[in-house]
Image: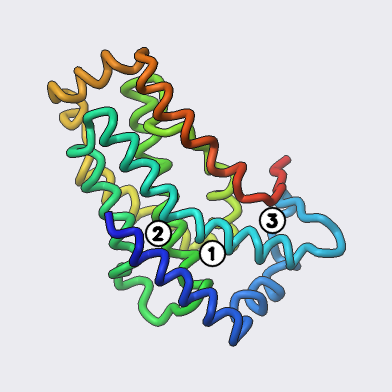
């Protein structure tokens, strides 16, 4: 994983935002049109939303490092790393549908792809192992990001994610001997210890957004 390159790219986007205020202006225009389910505090709604987007983007390298580390310790890196590399590539070489997007608002699109990819992988692990790869729940954060990106474009990004997962992970991926060995370690203290080092990342966003 080359998350150092992602961190540098995110830092450059923050610098771009500091100079232009592009994301802040965009969110200001979106505020009156947000879905009523997204509850924001009165008085600083725009500030909270801007901090949410920044945290959501900043979280991606840590998320990929966490997933890769737990997969490595569980002995299933060979199945998971290619999928995580796709999420990394979203940042380093974005899909063509991202052409012309710059700054933090562009990275929101790419962060959404990465978060959704990990969410899909987690869903697959819950299906096959009755518990996730990492104890992560970004469902609410992803729903909010989906709203901010816009229904039509976010749905296109979801299609990219589904295509990537379908091509990389299927039922056969979970029938390998290494996966069977992993299944047997799920109740081991070592696996539990690996997970406890990665608390629910969505709570670290530091922003309370409620979906009623």
Q: Is residue 29 left or right of residue 55?
A: right
Which tag, 3 or 2, sits closer to the chain's start? 3
Q: Quadrant of residue 96?
A: bottom left
To which residue does mark 2 refer? 157
Which tag, 1 or 2, sits closer to the chain's start? 1
In the rendered view, would you say 15 is above or below 33? below
Instruction: Tell whether label 2 touches label 3 (CB within 8 Å).
Output: no
Q: Quadrant of the C terminus?
A: top right
To which residue does mark 3 refer? 35
Residue 190 image position (x, y, % from top left)? 36, 20
How many residues crowd around disc 1 within 10 Å: few (fewer than 14), some, or many (20 or more)? some
Image point 33% across, 55% down: which residue?
87
168, 66: nearer the viewer? 66
Q: CA distance from mark 3 to mark 1?
A: 12 Å
Instruction: Tell whether label 2 touches label 1 (CB within 8 Å).
Output: yes
To which residue does mark 1 refer? 149
In the rendered view, would you say 46 is above or below 202? below
Secondary-structure class at tag 3: loop
Residue 15 image position (x, y, % from top left)? 53, 79
Image point 25% across, 40% down: which residue?
80
Image point 46% across, 77% down: which residue?
12
Q: CA distance from mark 3 to mark 2?
A: 19 Å
Instruction: Tell whether label 1 touches label 3 (CB within 8 Å).
Output: no
How many residues crowd around disc 2 within 10 Å: few (fewer than 14), some, or many (20 or more)? many
Image point 34% across, 52% down: which residue?
161
Which tag, 3 or 1, sits closer to the chain's start? 3
């Amino acid at each position: 994983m080359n998350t150092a390159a992602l961190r540098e790219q995110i830092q450059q986007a923050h610098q771009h935002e500091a100079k232009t205020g592009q994301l802040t202006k965009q969110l200001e225009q979106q505020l009156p049109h947000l879905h009523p389910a997204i509850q924001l505090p009165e008085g600083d709604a725009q500030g909270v939303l801007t901090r949410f987007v920044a945290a959501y983007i900043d979280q991606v390298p840590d998320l990929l490092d966490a997933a890769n580390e737990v997969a490595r310790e569980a002995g299933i890196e060979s199945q998971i790393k290619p999928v995580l590399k796709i999420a990394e590539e979203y940042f380093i070489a974005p899909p063509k549908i991202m052409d012309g997007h710059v700054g933090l608002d562009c990275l929101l699109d790419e962060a959404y792809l990465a978060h959704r990819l990990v969410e899909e992988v987690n869903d697959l692990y819950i299906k096959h192992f009755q518990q996730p790869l990492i104890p992560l729940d970004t469902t609410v954060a992803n729903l909010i990001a989906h709203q901010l990106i816009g229904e039509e474009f976010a749905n296109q990004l979801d299609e990219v994610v589904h295509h990537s997962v379908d091509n990389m992970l299927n039922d056969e991926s979970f029938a390998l001997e290494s996966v069977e060995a992993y299944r047997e370690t799920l109740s081991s203290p070592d696996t539990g210890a690996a997970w406890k080092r990665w608390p629910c990342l969505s709570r670290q966003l530091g922003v309370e957004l409620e979906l009623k």
